Image (cartoon, rainbow, N blue to C red):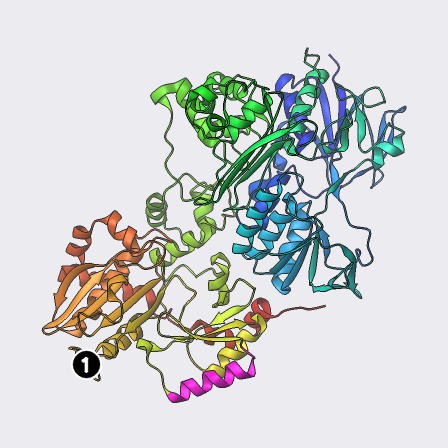
Amino acid sequence: MTREKLLLIGNGMAGVRTIEEILDRDAERYDITIIGEENYTNYNRIMLSNVLQNKNTIEEIITNPASWYAEQKIELVHHDPAVSLNTGARKVRTQSGKEIGFDKCILATGSRSFILPVEGSSLEGVLGFRTIDDTLSMLETAKSYRKAAVIGGGLLGLEAAKGLVDQGMDVTVVHLEKWLMETQLNEMAGKLLKADLEQQGLKFLMEKKTSRILGDTRVTGLEFSDGSILEADMVIMTVGIRPETALARQAGLAVNRGIVVNDWMETSAQGIYAVGECAEHQGKVYGLVAPLFEQGKVLADVLTGRETAPYGGSTTYTSLKVSGCDLFSAGEIKEVGGVKSIEAYDGLTNSYKKLFIKDNQVVGIVLYGDTSEENRYFKLLKQKQDISALTSVSLLPAGGGCCGGSAADDVTQWADDETICGCNGVTKGTILQAIRGKDLKSVAEVTKATKAGGSCGKCKGMIGDLLTYVLGDRVATAPTGICGCTDLSRDEIVLQIHEKGLTTTDEVYEQLGFRNREGCPKCRPAINFYLNVAFPKEHGDEPASRFVNERLHANIQNNGTFSVIPRMRGGQTTPQQLMQIARVAEKYEVPLVKVTGSQRIGLYGVKKEDLPNMWEELDMTSASAYAKAVRSVKTCVGAAFCRFGTQDSMGLGIKLEERYEFIDTPHKFKMGVSACPRSCAETGVKDFGVIGVENGFQIYIGGNGGTEVQEGQLLTTVETEQEVIDICGAFLQYYRETGIYAERTAPWLKRMGFDHVKKILLSAEQRAELLKRLDEAVEGKRRNPWQQVVEDPKLQKDLYAVVRG
């Protein structure tokens, strides 16, 4: 049988998903060619905000790598957009002049960011947020510039703004309307969202209309219709998208807002189809992913000769991918045309819900704060269930099965055609069929086979429920990996690092079979730390694997500036140091000078480009106040001046700090030395706490401040300062060798067992061994990072230079 030629124009989510559906139905039917405009293989566009927020890498959002096209025998015409379509001759010509014939053609040309047609919109620094290249441009710009303006307070704009805040930028969202996401949220929910985002560092200008973008060659700011001005080094346009229809118009196809299609996704030309954001069905153009996949399934059935129901439009819903701001919105959310509503607000949990009702059916949903009932309400909406038997009181809370609560939440009771994974349009029936037909036993296997759970991951719990429903106790319990790049735990990774003699992160990723060979922001710092501890001589520290604070040796603040905190061992300083700090603070116009909680003096609001010069002029070492390392030793004034002091707390604190400063640890490591049980240095909540008593020193370990305060546990009482110093060193090294990266000492002590740790540290032989390993590990590595930057012009240029237009 002669295979037909199928041409897909558009290498995005909707088109490639349609091809996947076709291959699942009949892999031998077509010779397939795909034309792509971008220089990437198929990727998950909705995850771009995660890339911007450092939750995913580019590699992690690639849905189909180049190998997939080869395996499926698909010809990919890469980075070469189609420029003309001849529907009569059945040919397409690309930008490079290539001509491609076809029997059937699918247009999946997607959409483009809408750029406001105002003066200055073509200036350098004005970007959309639609593609990988847009995202990379934003990340690159954030390295050199400080102020960003995001025009548009919708879903995409807020995700972009949060991502830029995470990059250290000062971000202002400019919105024309009275509240955020006014299409999806009502005023109450929109204002709750704004308040939560402000807590995360975003700024807002509401009811502002941009009249022009300022700048000569590069953007410098925005001017609004009321005459006011906002400074900006970068402007992100997120005011909507427009279907890409240029090729269809050139070919003479019927086009309104999008390419007009019927219920079978056919355009006005025979054998030419359209799916996705470029298609207009019954007057509607969809910009969300679930409808695109639903269209793709119908078209796949059509193109493989299967009987299928016509596409009848989609019910859409929205959620926001910004942590701490859970929201869900679906359907009609305005009280017009007979629509009434009921709502509830819980001020204690900051949760809000509002249901819109018409003719005894839920027609709209707004949830903010607690979105755990989104499936329940969305099911009521999609199935148009009659709710006349329910009262407002029984409808709003989840309650029991009487109102569709617990029973409706039970995914095993759902119909097979209901959607489990909205991101990828995967139904319960598809998942069950895959579990049974392909003998799948884990969530990861289901994701690999169906794509369900492969995007935002919110549906993984339901996938797990379906696995248990089908397999019972045969469900595979995968080991808990340190991140999504691997299923290996910390202990398994460290063990294999030692056994295989791995000395670089690349070796770890390759030889331990990480799914993402580049790693991610979660595993890269951890692997770098484990290698530093395992092979301190052989492994060279990898600055690129460290978080921004450790790369730049200063804490980035919520406005994009940095803090400079010089070391004052034991909290002790001199008049000369104080005068020098004052001179530097005055010279560089430091807006805030503050004594920190660790008895140091912090200079806050420092520009990135000023950091190297300030460090040089201060001529003091770094307090490592940004690092997962030994931070500081807090002390009281002690026996030298205090009437109650029994020991020289300041002297011992300085000795501890001199002995162990600049040593990396799994998390920050703080110490305190008090000269008497009054514990003025707050010794009880330090990782390593010392209290002077008449006959020596009590030692406490595992005390933590912070969000989960833990009181330290009494380890022992010793007579001499040297014993305190040695036990501290042994404790540090044992924590380094056995701690999970980013695990503080309190949970570490609980996991390891206090009695076990106590036995190790109080063994003179084991203590000596630990101290020996610590000294060997840090020999030649303990240095002041500020001095290193001051002495290295290349580091200054690479990390601290700021380019301004």
The residue segment tinted magenta is: 575-590
Task: Give residue 480's position: percent from left, percent from top.
Answer: 38, 39
Residue drawn at the location 62% of the way across and 29% of the way down: 340
Task: Give residue 662's position: percent from left, percent from top.
Answer: 37, 69
For disc 1, the marked residue is 639
601 displayed left or right of 420: left
Residue drawn at the location 60% of the way across and 60% of the way down: 169
Q: Is residue 785 visible?
A: yes
Out of 401 and 258, give the one closest to the viewer: 401
Give the vertical position of 713 relative to 15 (above or below): below
Q: Secondary structure at mark 1?
A: loop
Out of 635 and 325, give the one closest to the viewer: 325
Quadrant of res 168: bottom right
Task: Give residue 693's position: percent from left, percent from top.
Answer: 13, 72
Q: Is residue 5 magenta?
A: no
Give the vertical position of 421 relative to 766 (above or below): above
Q: Quadrant of the N terminus?
A: top right
Which amino acid, by three-letter code, is at mark 1?
Ala
Q: Is residue 419 visible?
A: no
Q: Quadrant of the C terminus?
A: bottom right
